[in-house]
Image: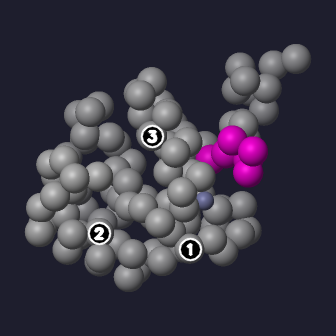
Amino acid sequence: MSRWPYNTQRWQRLRRKKLARDPLCQACESLGHGTPAHAVDHIKAIRNGGPAFPPIDQLLSLCQTHHTQKTAADMLDQGEAWTLRGCNPDGTPRDPDDPWNAP
Ligand SMILES: [Zn+2]
């Protein structure tokens, strides 16, 4: 986490602001768990054309597990869908129509 924009003062400020507002993992929260956030992530990844310093509501507070899942989704340009859809605690998509859940 030492590459741009994460190594800037501006990001550190944004990150602190986000964690002050949403100290719990937002993916866990949607599942009813109160897990402290460990990372702040971009809903739309920079690698997929998202802004480096987006408004706070376009950021996501995540625990370690969900941050790993979100990063993996970003690699496939599925980060936004992942954010909207949410996942089960074991990492499988919650959407029953997702191909992942096909028999
Ligand atoms: Zn979580």
Element assignment for label 2: helix
Disc 2 marks a residue whose amino acid type is Arg
Residue placed most toward the observer, 7 or 14 = 7
Residue placed most toward the observer, 58 or 40 = 40
Q: Position of residue 26 (x, y in %)?
A: 55, 64
Question: Taking 47 as reference, is 64 above or below it?
Answer: below
Checking the image for residue 71, the label placed there is 3
Q: CA distance from mark 3 to mark 2?
A: 17 Å
Question: Taking 90 as reference, is 19 above or below it?
Answer: below
Provide the residue designation for mark 2.
15
Element assignment for label 3: helix
Q: Horizontal placement of 17 versus 71: left or right?
A: left
Disc 3 marks a residue whose amino acid type is Thr
Magenta segment boundaries in residue numbering:
86-91
Residue placed most toward the observer, 3 or 80 = 3
In percent of the image, x 79 and y 26: which residue is there? 101
Q: Position of residue 24 (x, y in %)?
A: 54, 73
The part of the image, by quadrant, that contains residue 50 is: top left
Q: Position of residue 22 (x, y in %)?
A: 45, 75
Counting residues from the start of the chain, the first of labels 1 and 3 encountered is: 1
Disc 1 marks a residue whose amino acid type is Pro
Q: CA distance from mark 1 to mark 3?
A: 18 Å
